[in-house]
Every structure is written in C-alpha cells, then in structure tokens.
Image (cartoon, rainbow, N blue to C red):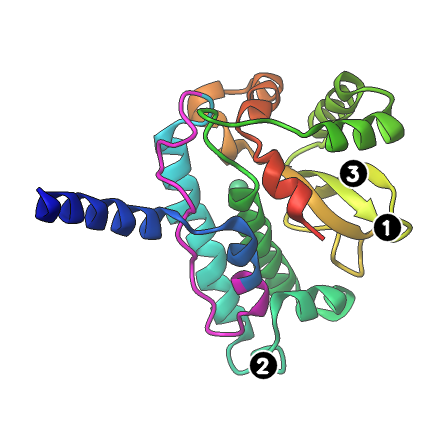
C-alpha cells in the first residue's frame, strides 16, 4: 500500500516538475541567454489553450515561426560584433542593428514573451481586483481597456503586435508595434516594460479564424495569464 502510494506520488511529482515551468523564470532565462540562442519549449502543451487557440496553430507558430526567428537570429549575428549580446542589450541598441538582427531578435523575444503570458482557460482565475483597479485608473473600465486593446490590434496594418506596457513614469499604456519591433527597442517612440502582448500577424490566427482578426482578439482574453502579467516588475 505504502509502495503504491509512493509510486503514485513519484509520478505526480515528476509530472509536476515537467509542467512547472514558471513563466517568470522562463523569461529570465530568455533574457539572460546569449548566442547560441535556443527555442524555449512552450510552458504548456500545444492543446492547452483550446478551444480559443487551436493546437495546430500553436504547434506551427512555435515549431516553425518562432524557431525560424531563433535560427535566423543565430545566423545573422554569427561572426559579427553582435554575437555575444543578450536580447535586451540588442534592443537597447536597436537603432544601430542590421535589419536582420533587429527583426529576428525581436521575433525571438516577442514570441517567448507571448507564450509566457498565456494560460489555459481552465482553472484560470483572471485578473485580480488590484489589477482591475489599476486598469480602471488608466482606461476608465476593463471593458474600455479591452476595446482599446482590440482597436489598436485591428488598426495595425499588416503585421505586428499589440501591447499593454508600463511606461517609464509608471503609467499603463496600450501601444502597437510593426513587424517584430517591441517597446524595449530604442527605435520605439513609446518605450516601457511589456506586461501583456497579442501577436496580430496572420500566422497567429489564420488557421482557425481566417481573416477575422477581431474574433481572434476577442478570444485572446480567455487565455491571458493575468497572474503572470501582475508578477512582472
Ligand atoms: Mn507570431
């Protein structure tokens, strides 16, 4: 009896240790990495965000799109003066980077961050009252914030990202960046700490939502990991 219990416990512990990739340390690892950069595993299963984000899209998005940015980043910095920098160091010098380094470094970090702030809709507590109060302070209401975030995502012509950031004076702001730019780059008009992001490139939603970016942006709220957003310093 005791042996069976211990075996069961061992199974539970080993499963938990595999699943317990904490998003904060996930981004700490990404932020500290230098070449050769590697594709971090998703911090959950490919089907974890169903039915809102489908498993096939997540698989292709991670294994092909994100992986391509990592591979091309390594190629673009190999043998250059950029080959021993962290992603954050590259972003602070974005205005001086070759386009391939800037785009692929952004592509790697933005996707890693995106994975880190998503979570299954099951057992998802949503935002805390403290976060709700802060959003109300800056946007009037949670609905007004979500409407602004969606509008900003819909207005991005072509490909890019929609962000909630904390600006350097501590305020919350919704912004959009084109291509693989992000609010950490010195090229960005408004800079700040990313708290939340949605990928509005067509590859992020086309298999399930076709051309309906608005439906995808509505579905996004079901899989936001607000606990992780609120832990970002
Ligand atoms: Mn993408």
Q: Secondary structure at mark 1?
A: loop
Q: Is label 3 or label 2 in front? A: 3
- The crowding category of the residue bearing disc 3, from other C-alpha atoms within 10 Å (few below 14, some 14 to 19, many at least 20), is many
Q: Which mark is residue 201?
A: none
Quick one: label 1 or label 3, which is nearer the N terminus? 3
Decide if residue 199 is in sight here: no
Q: Is label 1 or label 2 in front? A: 1
Q: Residue at x 40, y 24 (%)?
A: 50
| Residue labelled with disc 3 | 175
Q: Is 37 inside the magenta-drawn segment?
A: yes
Q: Which mark is residue 189?
A: 1
Horizontal arrangement in the rendering, residue 81 relative to residue 79 (left or right) = right
> Would you say the beta carbon of the disc 2 residue lies within 8 angstroms of ligand 1?
no
- The crowding category of the residue bearing disc 1, from other C-alpha atoms within 10 Å (few below 14, some 14 to 19, many at least 20), is few
> Would you say the beta carbon of the disc 1 residue lies within 8 angstroms of ligand 1?
no
**Distance CA(mark 3)–CA(mark 2):** 32 Å
Magenta part of the chain: 29-51
């Amino acid at each position: 009896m005791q042996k069976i219990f211990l075996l069961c416990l061992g199974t539970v512990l080993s499963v938990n240790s595999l699943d317990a990739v904490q998003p904060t340390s996930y981004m700490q690892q990404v932020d500290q990495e230098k070449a050769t950069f590697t594709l971090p595993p998703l911090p959950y299963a490919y089907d974890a965000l169903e039915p809102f984000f489908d498993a096939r899209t997540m698989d292709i998005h991670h294994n092909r799109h994100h992986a391509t940015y990592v591979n091309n980043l390594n190629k673009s910095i190999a043998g250059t003066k950029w080959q021993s920098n962290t992603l954050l160091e590259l972003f602070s010098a974005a205005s001086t980077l070759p386009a391939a380094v800037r785009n692929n470094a952004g592509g790697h970090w933005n996707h890693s961050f995106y994975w880190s702030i998503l979570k299954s809709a099951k057992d998802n507590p949503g935002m805390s009252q403290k976060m709700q109060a802060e959003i109300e302070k800056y946007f009037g209401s949670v609905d007004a914030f979500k409407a602004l975030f969606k509008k900003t995502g819909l207005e991005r012509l072509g490909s890019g990202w929609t962000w909630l950031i904390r600006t350097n004076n501590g305020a919350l702001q919704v912004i959009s960046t084109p291509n693989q730019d992000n609010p950490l780059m010195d090229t960005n008009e408004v800079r700040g700490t990313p708290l939340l992001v949605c990928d509005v490139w067509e590859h992020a939603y086309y298999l399930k939502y076709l051309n309906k970016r608005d439906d995808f942006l509505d579905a996004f709220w079901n899989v936001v990991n607000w606990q992780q957003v609120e832990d970002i310093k």
